Amino acid sequence: MDRGPQSKPPQPPFTAFPSLSNSPSSCRFTLESVPYPSHRRPVQKPWGELRIIDRIRARTEPSDRIPLGIGDDCAILKPPPNHELLVTTDFSLEDRHFRRAWHNPASIGHRTLARGLSDLAAMGAKPLAAFLSLALPKSIARTPLFLDGFLDGLLALAAAHNVPLAGGDTAQSPADLILADIILTGSAPTGRALRRSTASPGDLLYVTGALGGAAAELAALSKRRKPSRPTSPSLTTTHYSLPTASPHLFPQPRLAVGQTLLRRRLATACIDVSDGLSTDLAHLCTASHVSAELDLAALPLHPLAAALDDRAQITALLHGGEDYELLFTAAPTTRIPRSIANVPITQIGRILAARKNRPQMSILTGTERFELQPHGWEHFA
């Protein structure tokens, strides 16, 4: 019977490498065996990823809190004994959190770090280390101007608060946009970190600094046809000068205040004002299962917001974000100083028990009471 055509055994796939067997007829493996046109060490590009990493590493300082920092697969951190590790992360996205037409590189770097430091401040933590992931368009990465200015702003703020940069990542942005992600670690005594979920009915409500300044400055920036470049913070080996009259471009995280509130056991709960007073107070009320009452006349208005009309002032005060002040509660028997670390403290309301027939937040204007809805910043809204 005819068995038909016989199937052929499978052929080995083609390989560019010669056989490495001990057969006398085999070729000896040499560099010429490698299927690349050149065997010379590749020349490092003037502004390739490795050069960017080297430039960042050259500007970082060693710290006894970081036994191993930039240069390995992971950093090694050493938190203080009997302390817990706190971790926060924040995106800074071009055309969402900043614009190159309004913010110079130093402001972008400063703001990138300030956002995370404010989270640590809200929990009374001491910063331990920072990690920066930075995606740059190729056109930006080819020149040192942006990176150097960005590091000027970030590292000036880091030095002012003793925050070493311990690592991160770099990449080419898939679009013509800058993306920065900051991860911050901090420490607080075990079981002592401030939280937004521990306010109680009867507590009084306080805020640091002044409100509405960041929103007012942002509104002014958006109206300029040819935005002027803000002044960069000066960065030298012995002195760091951080702008204080520019709450949007160079916000100041209240780390010293938060640490004092924790150390002296002054606050019962705390949150930072990043999305707007109305929204962040709602977060605190929801987490603590309480309601709140604000006194409109007591709210501290930033001088930049004072130049706005009445309606714009109210909007900036209640809903303007990125003030990065601390909103905290304290027991009515606790004596709160008028200022901490030269930052004014203002009582602005009180905490009430949550009830079905009571709004979560109310605002008092003289003899009238109105329900306050959260209308601060919210992504995807």
Image (spheres, helix red, strand yellow):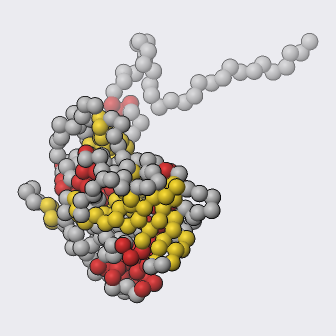
The quarter of the picture where the C terminus appears is: bottom right
Query: In which quarter of the view is residue 74 placed?
Result: top left
For the N terminus, the image quarter is top right
Number of callouts: 0
Nearer to the camera, 222 or 73 = 222
Q: Quadrant of residue 77?
A: top left
Residue 101 visible in the shown view: no
Looking at the picture, does residue 61 appear above or below residue 4? below
Q: Could one spot residue 231 in this view of the protein?
A: yes
* Image position, residue 333 (x, y; %): 33, 53
Task: Give the residue at x 35% y 32%.
Answer: 32
Residue 323, compared with residue 304, is above or below; it is above
279 left or right, relative to 31 = right
Front residue (pair 28, 108): 108
Q: Nearer the viewer, residue 320 or 15?
A: 320
Residue pictured at 47% horizontal, 54% vertical: 201
Residue nearer the viewer, 128 or 293: 293
> Could you say where residue 361 lies in the image, as x and y percent from the top left?
52, 65
**In the image: residue 199, left or right of residue 56:** right
Q: Residue furthest right?
A: 1
> Which residue is painted at 36% across and 73% down in the image?
298
Q: Is residue 228 above or below residue 8?
A: below
Q: Position of residue 236 (x, y in %)?
A: 11, 60
